[in-house]
Image (cartoon, rainbow, N blue to C red):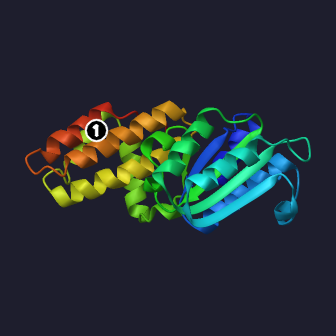
């Protein structure tokens, strides 16, 4: 995840908000390194830096969101950027609504990093206001499966149809594939610096098709053919 954040920083493309999905350790390592770049300080000194804020909680409520907003709009103590890093088990609906408003109109030179083990920790609309990064290890997918998903994303529509034929008659394997595709696609496209709207549309398309697979009457083959023909192609 840090490789992507570092590239965004070096290219002056660092966004105001990121959602890091994966292990707590992996997200913390990536955010601390990025915060060190932003605040021009060593990682071990960050927790004493007046413009670095760390939130850790099992549940994040609306009062926490309000306090976060208040803190974020206060002037920087060092006349530079401010960094907020949150590791939270779950967010209440009211807290997410408050965060949504903050992410839609964030203060200048303030950066928010939210980490969780699952993308479902945040609502779809809130995720759409953030750049979503997946830790490859955090996806809990075997290397063989990740390699196959990457091969599928890089393939032409015709090649994708051939790959999908290997399991299109097996509903359980199809569901497993589409679920992995939903997560892995965002990881691969983010690593290439993909445009945020395109990533959001891609993930939502995969998520919608995964839900369609819950209906036994719908053909797995038709759903896979639709994905093969409509999903954007990963650059080689």
Q: Among all residues in the image, which is located at the extreme right?
A: 78
Q: With respect to residue 194, does 133 lie above or below?
A: below
x and y percentages locating residue 110 in the rendered image:
75, 41
Dot 1: within a 10 Å radius of its alpha carbon, few (fewer than 14), some, or many (20 or more) residues? many
Q: Which residue is at the front of the view, 158 or 217?
A: 217
Secondary structure of residue under mark 1: helix
Q: Residue at x 24, y 55 (%)?
A: 175
Q: Which residue is at the front of the view, 75 or 181?
A: 75
x and y percentages locating residue 174 in the rendered image:
22, 54
Q: Residue at x 62, y 64 (%)?
A: 26
Q: Among all residues in the image, which is located at the extreme left?
A: 217
Q: Residue at x 77, y 52 (%)?
A: 35
Residue 187 appears anywhere in the view: no
Q: Residue at x 29, y 42 (%)?
A: 208
x and y percentages locating residue 62 in the rendered image:
56, 52
Q: Hey, which quadrant is residue 131 in on the image?
A: top right
x and y percentages locating residue 7 in the rendered image:
70, 42
User: How many circles with numbers are drawn on the protein?
Assistant: 1
Residue 20 located left or right of residue 207: right
Q: Which residue position holds label 1? A: 227
Q: Hey, which quadrant is residue 80 in on the image?
A: top right
Q: Which residue is at the front of the view, 115 or 209?
A: 115
């Amino acid at each position: 995840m840090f490789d992507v954040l570092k590239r965004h920083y070096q290219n002056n493309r660092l966004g105001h908000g990121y959602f890091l999905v994966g292990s707590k350790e992996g997200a913390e390592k990536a955010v601390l390194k990025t915060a060190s770049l932003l605040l021009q300080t060593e990682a071990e000194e960050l927790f004493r830096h007046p413009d670095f804020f760390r939130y850790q909680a099992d549940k994040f409520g609306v009062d926490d969101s309000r306090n976060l907003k208040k803190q974020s709009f206060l002037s920087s103590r060092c006349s530079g950027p401010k960094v907020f890093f949150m590791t939270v088990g779950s967010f209440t609906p009211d807290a997410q609504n408050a965060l949504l408003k903050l992410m839609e109109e964030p203060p200048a030179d303030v950066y928010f990093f939210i980490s969780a083990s699952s993308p479902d920790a945040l609502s779809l609309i809130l995720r759409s206001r953030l750049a979503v990064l997946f830790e490859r290890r955090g996806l809990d997918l075997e290397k063989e499966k990740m390699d196959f998903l990457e091969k599928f994303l890089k393939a032409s529509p015709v090649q994708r149809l051939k790959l999908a034929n290997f399991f299109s008659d097996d509903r359980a394997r199809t569901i497993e594939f589409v679920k992995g595709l939903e997560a892995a696609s965002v990881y691969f496209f983010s690593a290439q610096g993909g445009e945020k709207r395109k990533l959001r549309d891609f993930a939502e398309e995969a998520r919608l098709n995964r839900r369609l697979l819950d209906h036994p009457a719908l053909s797995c083959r038709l759903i896979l053919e639709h994905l093969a023909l409509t999903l954007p192609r990963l650059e080689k």
